[in-house]
Amino acid sequence: MFKKISEGAVTSISELRRVLQIDSVDDEDDLNYASIHQTRSSPTNSSSHSRVIRSLDAEKAVIAECKPRVEVFEISRKIVDPTNANFLVWPPCVEVQRCSGCCNSKNMRCAPTRIHVRHVQVNKIFITPKGKKQVKVVVPLEDHHDCKCEPVPSSAVRIHHPPPETKKAEPPPSTMAPVPASQKEEQPLRPHKKKNRKFKHLPSKKEQRELLVT
């Protein structure tokens, strides 16, 4: 445009307006072409920049205080009917309010101080050869309304004891009477043989009288 004006091609205001309009249209076309070309040439770059958001400023860490928060609670078949397992539950999970958060010490825990029990209706679905059958079942859910850091019960605190020393297994006590030490040392003796004793013949009283008379 500056070249046209310097060469004297523009001699009136109407011609200047015409030149300005043409140049503006050309610039607009160039901008549209550049934007389209950039979008087609680098689709991955735009998607990558939209996915990753980096910040050079570090946020200040804030403690997660002990308070009720929304959690997802699974409605299992055991809750609906503990005597049967041949069915489905819909919906399988719901939102509940439960206490969670940090306390100042490991000996403290976030516990509920006020609990509300509400009842919800779920579908108990049976699949049979004839088709699908649904039954409405009421399930109680527990919501925590107020929370507080309380000491952990002593039973829940794990106390680490050293492992007990392994002792050798002792033999079972004997029912027999103990054998004396003297009897253990002595060897068994052989039985004595009986010897036939020879007795001398003694005269009878009658024979003794006869001997005395003679």
Image: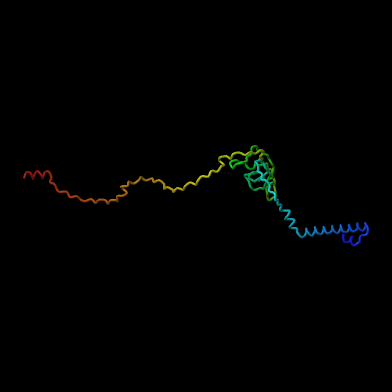
121 vs 201, left or right, is: right
Residue 98 in percent (x, y) is at 66, 42
Give whichever of 117, 209 is nearer the camera.
117
In screen coordinates, is 135 left or right of 25? left
Outermost left residue? 214
In-front residue for pair 138/39: 39
Q: Please identify the residue farthest to the front as the structure is shown.
A: 6
Identified at 32% across, 47% down, the residue is 181
Q: Which residue corresponds to the image point at 13% horizontal and 47% vertical from the top-left?
A: 202
Image location of residue 104, percent across then percent down: 61, 41
Task: Name the residue nearer the viewer: 196 or 75.
Answer: 75
Determine the residue positioned at 59% across, 39% down. 151
Residue visible at 53% across and 43% down in the picture? 159
State the residue lying farthest toward the top: 114
How many numbered badges does the structure rendering display?
0
Q: Residue 49, how many percent across, how many down?
A: 73, 54
> As drawn, is 119 to the left or to the right of 177?
right
Residue 207 x, y percent position in the rendering: 10, 45
Quarter of the picture holding the N terminus: bottom right
The front one of 28 and 180 is 28
Q: Can residue 157 be seen in this view?
A: yes
Q: How is the image coloured?
A: rainbow
